């Protein structure tokens, strides 16, 4: 068609603009002759390559991304002004297994990690302060700052606290979700040592929180309740000294790549996300799974419209049913709050060229590659199966990245066409979907997938990216969120606060 456009699938009735087009420009080489643009089309957006009748499906990636809300002419800009979603409420599904699935296998590949006493493997040797309640966020931050100044050296990668709003005045599932996320961070192997800091009067008080944590190593996990101490800073620093001494007993050593767990996420998408960044991450996921590792995909609302692709890759009928429940339960959540499941809600996504939730979803699921879905996890659960896992969680960047880390992911791969400085509690690799973003935001972006639309071979770029992630896992490279101190958490909330 043109070096300035890309056709994704032979069944598609739209193509993607690789640059800004003006009205009246001509695209040559179409199946039905040259195409004259009827209006200006921004880069990343869609152009109709044939007439699409009102109510006829708009096809991208070989799948419907919605239907024409009005008649669309060849050469029209195809976007929210003339396309509507096909999504509705909950659906019934049939298990139709896909034959070609990437299966978890064994491998001799290794990376250099830290083997903890319980056999878990971490990729960083850090100390984390996990506060049970938001009232003491600043106290935890002060202790982390002081401990960093005193103890950070070649054996310790840093001391970090993670502010949040919850732990008090919460009821039911909200309190349970807070406890699950925080307890999973306590167990995360990227932390050699943990200081659990409580206030003393909160719902999530330390003795109650210990019940959720379960078994723990008292050398690795220390507790302080600040209302019970005369000087909480002084007492916390005494505990920090013990944790720093303990952390220094760990050294990097070769460990099987099967121990590596990677979270998959996208945010601030554009029209190139489903062409560059997400397929690259999908190819990485397949390669890691073939070598015995694990990946985990979340953002359930951004599976709507593409869920049958994942259902077809379920390893068995019970796993298929879990995916059905995962999708329909989240739709029920929308409906329970009187919100229609109808279209892509993000203004940034729309500006970048994403028109409907189906379009976003078809790009989103590509991050899972062709991996067999081995397990479906509720929010706040931890991975236990090698291969591709699905995790309950919203599309919100902060909440979903936190959930991925809490599920056990050592690293989160974050594709973006718009950019964000945000980082989670684990290394958060920002992958730009276009080269302009990579050039503009060098302090945000770690890897540029935009090279794929500039002629770079996908297999070659996948190999480069795979090697880069192994270097990150082995501590040879740091992500930008680590370099610049972007480490945050956010916890899902659904109910009332007292």
Image: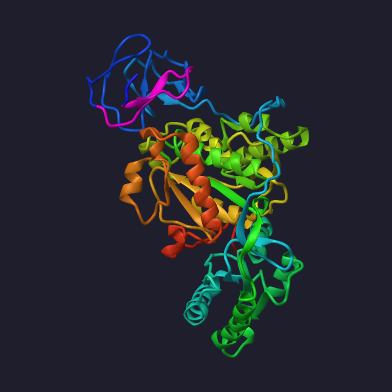
- Residue 473 screen position, x and y as percent: 56, 57
User: Which span of residues is magenta-colored?
Assistant: 4-21
Side (left or right) of 483 relative to 103: left
Nearest the eye: 11 or 256:
256
Residue 201 figure quarter: bottom right
**Picture layout, residue 63 above or below residue 310:** above
Q: Point out the residue furthest to the bottom here.
A: 230
* Residue 10 part of the magenta-drawn span: yes
The residue depicted at 49 percent of the width and 48 percent of the height is 414
- Residue 297 screen position, x and y as percent: 60, 44
**Picture layout, residue 215 above or below residue 321:** below
Nearest the eye: 195 or 80:
195
Q: What kind of secondary structure does the magenta stretch mostly adopt?
A: loop
* Residue 247 part of the magenta-drawn span: no
The residue depicted at 48 percent of the width and 31 percent of the height is 359
Residue 346 figure quarter: top left
């Amino acid at each position: 068609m043109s070096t300035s456009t890309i056709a994704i699938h032979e069944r598609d009735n739209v193509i993607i603009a690789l640059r800004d087009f003006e009205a009246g420009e001509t695209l040559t080489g179409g199946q039905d002759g040259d195409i004259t643009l009827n209006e200006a089309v921004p880069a990343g957006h869609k152009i109709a390559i044939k007439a699409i009748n009102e109510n006829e499906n708009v096809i991208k990636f070989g799948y419907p991304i919605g239907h024409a809300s009005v008649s669309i002419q060849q050469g029209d800009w195809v976007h929210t002004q003339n396309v509507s979603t096909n999504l509705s409420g909950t659906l019934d599904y049939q298990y139709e297994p896909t034959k070609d699935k990437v299966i978890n296998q064994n491998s001799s590949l290794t990376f250099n990690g830290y083997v903890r006493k319980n056999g878990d493997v971490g990729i960083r040797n850090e100390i984390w302060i996990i506060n049970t309640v938001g009232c003491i966020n600043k106290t935890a931050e002060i202790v982390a700052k002081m401990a960093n100044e005193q103890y950070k050296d070649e054996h310790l990668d840093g001391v970090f606290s993670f502010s949040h709003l919850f732990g008090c005045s919460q009821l039911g599932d909200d309190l349970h979700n807070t406890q699950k996320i925080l307890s999973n961070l306590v167990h995360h192997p990227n932390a050699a040592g943990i200081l659990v800091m409580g206030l003393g009067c909160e719902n999530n008080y330390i003795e109650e929180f210990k019940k959720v944590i379960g078994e723990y190593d008292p050398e690795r996990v220390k507790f302080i309740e600040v209302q019970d101490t005369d000087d909480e800073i002084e007492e916390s620093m005494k505990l920090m000294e013990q944790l720093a001494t303990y952390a220094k007993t760990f050294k990097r050593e070769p460990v099987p790549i099967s121990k590596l767990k990677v979270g998959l996420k996208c945010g601030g998408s554009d029209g190139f996300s489903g062409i560059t960044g997400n397929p690259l991450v999908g190819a990485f996921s397949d390669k890691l799974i073939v070598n015995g590792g694990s990946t985990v995909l979340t953002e359930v609302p951004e599976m709507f419209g593409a869920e049958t692709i994942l259902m077809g890759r379920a390893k068995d009928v019970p796993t298929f049913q879990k995916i059905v429940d995962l999708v329909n339960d989240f739709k029920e959540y929308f409906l329970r709050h009187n919100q229609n499941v109808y279209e892509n809600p993000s203004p940034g996504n729309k500006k970048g060229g994403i028109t409907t939730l189906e379009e976003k979803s078809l790009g989103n699921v590509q991050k899972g590659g062709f991996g067999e879905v081995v397990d479906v996890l509720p929010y706040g659960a931890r991975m236990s199966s090698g291969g591709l896992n699905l995790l309950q969680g919203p599309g919100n960047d902060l909440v979903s990245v936190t959930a991925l880390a809490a599920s056990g992911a050592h690293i989160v791969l974050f594709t973006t066409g718009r950019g964000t400085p945000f980082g989670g509690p684990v290394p958060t690799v920002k992958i730009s979907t276009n080269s302009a973003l990579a050039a503009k935001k060098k302090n945000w972006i770690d890897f540029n997938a935009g090279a794929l639309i500039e002629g770079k071979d996908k297999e070659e770029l996948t190999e480069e990216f795979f090697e880069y992630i192994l270097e990150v896992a082995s501590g040879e490279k740091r992500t930008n969120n680590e370099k610049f101190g972007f480490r945050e958490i956010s916890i899902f909330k659904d109910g009332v606060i007292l």
